[in-house]
Image (cartoon, rainbow, N blue to C red):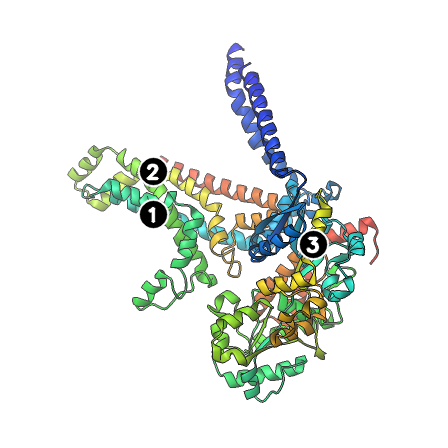
């Protein structure tokens, strides 16, 4: 009896609470009549910068108000999945482009193909093809590239010249020869290259340069034991095995810039954000002595990884038109050039690169060159896990001095296990390769 | 009959709450642990497969799980006793006749318990910094070499243990202090008259008198320490080289990073079994010791 009474009271209270919060929600989203509020999630530093640009968008589109939510990169992946489950995804979000396949497997992303087709601003042909490709799955355009992130070679031009090399290495043989000469010159305790062990990208870049793909049979199995992939693993491991690179992660070098300045290493595989950091943190006397170069490939300039962030619209959103308007705005070359000036994030469109800031900067030239030769990482929902295994196995292989064969078969074993469900899904849906 | 009805009426709400918020979730979690719930199932429940004990078998075969379990046991086996020893030491000091400013010290030593774990973990990261941290500063000024506390796989877990001990010992200290104060003074007097020194008084009066409290503290500490998560999450993210990856951290990653809820639930159950086993062992040992005296 008492129990029933309290339940009834609670039930009433609960429904009152729900009604109040619902009306609060309504009143929040309809603060000004006729104004659509678009929720936009951005990650990390972009979140600090983007409001400056958003102001301009809102001035141009008085009917749209953008609510920017900043998500730290560390927790972004968890946050997105949790929000999907809770039905709390925003309208637009910035997404690491390797996550697109995963969120597409959830059916969370809306297909932007027709919107792109009708758009005046977004011109597919203007984008670097490798970057655009990261957003396309089964002919559906699931995201629009926002900025690109690829890795290439930062090097000390003075040290390289001093060692008798007139230009940075263009293929693996030259790279290897230069690394050996630099190690010789640097002496014990110093190294030729720094390849951070906490990153999987360097290894993925070398793997993408091979004719053998990273995964085989339509992403059903790992392909690390193929001749090409084994060669890539061996080339990577040889830097550590032969003492050309220190077996450490970025956090173990207390200050990467100091070490680069004092010649602890002369080659550094890193990304565009370090251009700004190098300018800010390296001493003035080094400023003319460092440069960037496209990544050497097995025989001639090689491909690199097509990283970066895309802008996506979620299916759950009811404001997809307004959301796409925001994306189209952020994709305009003049806006991208401003975004680069504010954040140092490289734009994905060729015409954005012709704007003054980028066109006259010799240190970013190599990136433009490299961006014409980038490839997406395998577009399977499991990629994030595979990449993590790649990092873990490689780190062990380096520390325990494994052979390329052993590393490859360990990788295949782990990756095949990760892809088991995918094989099942593909088999059941009866889709071919 | 009437009595039992009345009993049910009183117990009913409590039982109902336990059923809804404990029994049901636990049963659901067990059911999920027998499936391969993952992101595909998240997209469409039709993609969910019943896999029987496969999650458990795969876990038992996964080196990473054993690594996490070994790390956790390391933390429990070293951190638990260390933390209880610190608590006991502090409680004994506070309980001595000679101690002054008791209230002040009691509060000061208890203070770490009520601080926010994440905030103090960040401060400890500063303290443990390889080159600028105070811990290494003290070590090097005493002539010891620098230690890369959070970057070296051999030192990361000791660093976490040190931090957890500091953070937690105050709590047990208060409980033990209460236990100490409950031991009748007459027993000490009698022991002294019989010629027992400090150590024998401790071994034959304090410890037996404290046994039930110590048992409680042991169980609580063990259960708490098995659930190691926030310390590595904030300080090391499970690294370096997975040296601070705990079972709970692994579960968290499986569940919320990869959304492999099947495997995560299986981890939770294995952890539960382990805690049950250790708690039973503690109970057994205490009973034996209780029987002997």
B107 vs B76, left or right, is left
Return the residue nearer the eye: B202 or A172: A172
Residue identified by numbered label 1: B85
Residue drawn at x 60%, y 75% is: A363
| Mark 1 surroundings within 10 Å by alpha-carbon count, few (fewer than 14), some (14 through 19), many (20 or more) | some
Q: Nearer the viewer, mark 3 or mark 1?
A: 3
Q: Secondary structure at mark 3?
A: helix
Element marked by disc 2: helix
Q: Do dots 3 and 2 share one subunit?
A: no
CA separation in Å, label 1 and label 2: 13 Å
Find residue B273 and report its horizontal and vertical position in percent.
Answer: 54, 42
Residue at screen point 29% across, 46% down: B89
Residue shown at 43% from the left, 54% from the top: B122
Picture disc at residue A327 = 3
Give the residue number, with chain letter if any, for mark 2: B175
Q: Secondary structure at mark 1?
A: helix
Is label 1 or label 2 in front?
Answer: 2
Chain identifier of the residue bearing label 1 in the image:
B
Residue A256 seen by the camera: yes
């Amino acid at each position: 009896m008492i129990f029933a009474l309290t339940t009834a009271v609670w039930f009433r209270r609960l429904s009152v609470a729900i009604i109040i919060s619902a009306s609060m929600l309504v009143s929040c989203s309809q603060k000004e009549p006729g104004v659509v509020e678009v929720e936009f999630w951005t990650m990390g530093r972009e979140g600090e910068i983007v409001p400056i640009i958003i102001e301009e968008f809102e001035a141009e589109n008085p009917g749209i108000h953008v609510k920017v939510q900043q998500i730290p990169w560390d927790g972004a992946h968890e946050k997105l999945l949790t929000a999907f489950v809770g039905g709390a995804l925003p309208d637009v979000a910035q997404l690491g482009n390797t996550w697109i396949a995963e969120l597409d497997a959830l059916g969370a992303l809306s297909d932007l193909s027709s919107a792109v087709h009708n758009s005046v601003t977004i011109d597919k042909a203007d984008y670097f093809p490798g970057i655009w490709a990261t957003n396309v799955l089964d002919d559906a355009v699931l995201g629009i590239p926002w900025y690109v992130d690829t890795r290439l070679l930062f090097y000390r031009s003075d040290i390289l010249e001093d060692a008798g090399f007139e230009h940075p290495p263009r293929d693996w043989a030259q790279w290897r020869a230069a690394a050996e000469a630099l190690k010789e010159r640097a002496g014990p305790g110093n190294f030729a290259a720094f390849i951070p062990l906490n990153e999987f990208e360097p290894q993925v870049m070398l793997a993408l340069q091979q004719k053998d793909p990273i995964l085989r049979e339509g992403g059903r199995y790992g392909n690390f034991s193929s001749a090409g992939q084994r060669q890539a693993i061996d080339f990577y491991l040889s830097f550590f095995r032969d003492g050309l690179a220190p077996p450490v992660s970025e956090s173990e070098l207390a200050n990467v810039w100091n070490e680069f300045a004092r010649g602890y290493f002369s080659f550094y595989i890193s990304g565009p954000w370090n251009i700004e950091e190098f300018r800010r943190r390296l001493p003035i006397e080094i400023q003319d002595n460092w440069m960037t170069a496209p990544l050497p490939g097995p025989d001639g300039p090689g491909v690199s990884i097509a990283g970066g962030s895309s802008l996506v619209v979620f299916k759950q959103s009811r404001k997809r038109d307004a959301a796409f308007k925001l994306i189209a705005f952020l994709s305009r070359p003049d806006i991208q050039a401003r975004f680069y000036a504010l954040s140092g994030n490289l734009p994905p469109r060729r015409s954005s690169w012709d704007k003054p800031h980028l066109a006259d900067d010799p240190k970013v030239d190599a990136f433009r060159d490299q961006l014409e030769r980038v490839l997406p990482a395998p577009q399977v929902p499991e990629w994030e896990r595979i990449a993590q295994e790649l990092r873990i196995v490689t780190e062990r292989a380096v520390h325990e001095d494994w052979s390329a064969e052993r590393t490859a078969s360990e990788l295949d074993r782990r990756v095949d296990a990760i892809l088991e469900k995918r094989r099942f899904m593909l088999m059941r849906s009866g889709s071919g390769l | 009959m009437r009595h039992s009805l009345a009993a049910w009426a009183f117990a009913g709400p409590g039982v109902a709450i336990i059923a809804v918020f404990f029994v049901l979730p636990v049963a659901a979690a067990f059911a999920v642990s027998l499936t391969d719930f993952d992101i595909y199932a998240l997209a469409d429940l039709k993609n969910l497969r019943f896999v029987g004990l496969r999650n458990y078998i795969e876990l038992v075969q996964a080196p990473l799980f054993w690594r996490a379990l070994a790390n956790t046991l390391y933390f429990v086996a070293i951190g638990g006793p260390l933390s209880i020893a610190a608590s006991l030491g502090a409680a004994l000091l506070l309980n001595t006749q000679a101690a002054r400013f008791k209230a002040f010290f009691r509060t000061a030593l208890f203070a770490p318990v009520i601080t926010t774990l994440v905030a103090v973990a960040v401060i400890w990261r500063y303290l443990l910094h390889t080159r600028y941290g105070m811990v290494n500063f003290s070590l090097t000024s005493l002539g010891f070499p620098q230690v890369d506390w959070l970057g070296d796989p051999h030192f990361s877990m000791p660093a976490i243990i040190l931090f957890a001990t500091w953070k937690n010992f105050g709590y047990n200290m208060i409980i033990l202090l209460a236990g100490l104060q409950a031991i009748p003074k007459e027993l000490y007097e009698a022991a002294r008259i019989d010629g027992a020194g400090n150590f024998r008084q401790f071994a034959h009066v304090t410890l037996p008198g404290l046994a039930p409290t110590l048992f409680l503290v042991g169980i609580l500490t063990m259960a708490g320490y098995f659930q190691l998560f926030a310390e590595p999450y904030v300080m090391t993210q499970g690294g370096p080289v997975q040296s601070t990856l705990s079972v709970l951290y692994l579960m968290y990653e499986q569940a919320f990073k990869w959304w492999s809820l099947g495997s995560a639930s299986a981890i939770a159950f294995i952890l539960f079994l382990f805690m049950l086993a250790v708690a039973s062992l503690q109970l057994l040992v205490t009973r034996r010791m209780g029987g002997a005296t």
